[in-house]
Image: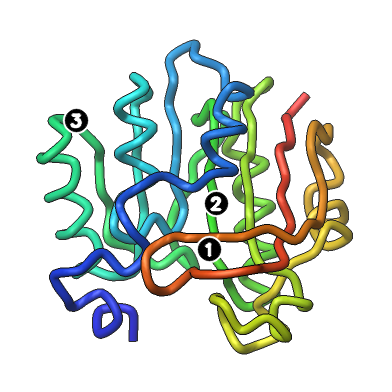
Amino acid sequence: MWDKIYNTAEYMYGTEPNQFLQESVQYIPKRSGNILCLGDGEGRNSVYLAKLGYNVTAVDLSSVAINKAKKLADEHQVKVTYIHANLDNYEFGENQWDGIVSIFCHLPSQLRARVNHSAFLSLRPGGVYVIEGYTTRQLEYKTGGPSSEDMMISGQILSSELSQMKTIILTETERFIHEGIKHNGLSHVVQGVLIKS
């Protein structure tokens, strides 16, 4: 499915980084600066982070998206490690990442809970999880995102699944999103920045 969506010369979600990521990157420690991007798609967010000097690894299910991401990284003359993998069986490691970024990486609820647990375990102490996704209210807006309520997230869900982390930001909000042709218009999202103590 995703290969078909991405199989066009146009970048379906644009080439500019996500607005919330730009606002939140200040919280990610520089130390060694190892960041993992989940469901990174065509590379807009991983390339942005690499341009800031982070060591970025990005995972996506679509080989077509990864090829476009590599092209974008080349155009910006940055190095990103792209991995073609399903998050269902991806090995996150332990105490490995200074930051994990999940921007509109919507997953079935059972898989999402496992991924969030793996993200927590794989962050170093002081590591930061930056996440933005659509809430169930987004189904009324129809300006992007999945059509399944099971794949939506909320502040309550994140609070529960990431309860071992300290919350810096956790809010549900309405905002205009203009990210390519797939995310366009007034939307309802949850935004989170959480830190591993």
Rendered-image quadrant of the C terminus: top right
SS of the residue under disc 2: strand
**Left or right, 86 with reference to 132:** left
**Callout 2–callout 1 Cβ contact below 8 Å:** yes
Question: Which label's residue is closer to the chain start, 3 or 1?
Answer: 3
Instruction: Tell me whether circle 2 and circle 3 mark residues in contact (CB < 8 Å).
Output: no
Q: Is residue 63 left or right of residue 118?
A: left
Q: Is disc 3 placed on a helix, strand or loop?
A: loop
Which one is nearer the viewer's eye here, 18 or 158? 18
Q: Which quadrant of the view contains residue 78?
A: top left
Q: Can you tell which mark lies on residue 78?
A: 3
Residue on which the image places disc 1: 105
Residue depicted at x 71% and y 38%:
193
Q: CA distance from mark 2 to mark 1?
A: 6 Å
Residue identified by numbered label 2: 102
Q: CA distance from mark 2 to mark 3?
A: 20 Å
Left/right placement of residue 26 relative to residue 51 reads right
- Where 90 falls versus 51 (above or below)? below
What residue do we see at 34% from left, 26% from top? 55
Query: On screen, 21 above or below 160?
Result: above
Q: Amino acid at mark 2?
A: Ser
Disc 1 residue type? Cys
User: Tag 1's secondary structure?
Assistant: loop
Q: Position of residue 169 (x, y in %)?
A: 79, 37
Residue 135 is situated, as x and y percent measured from the top left of the image, at 74, 70
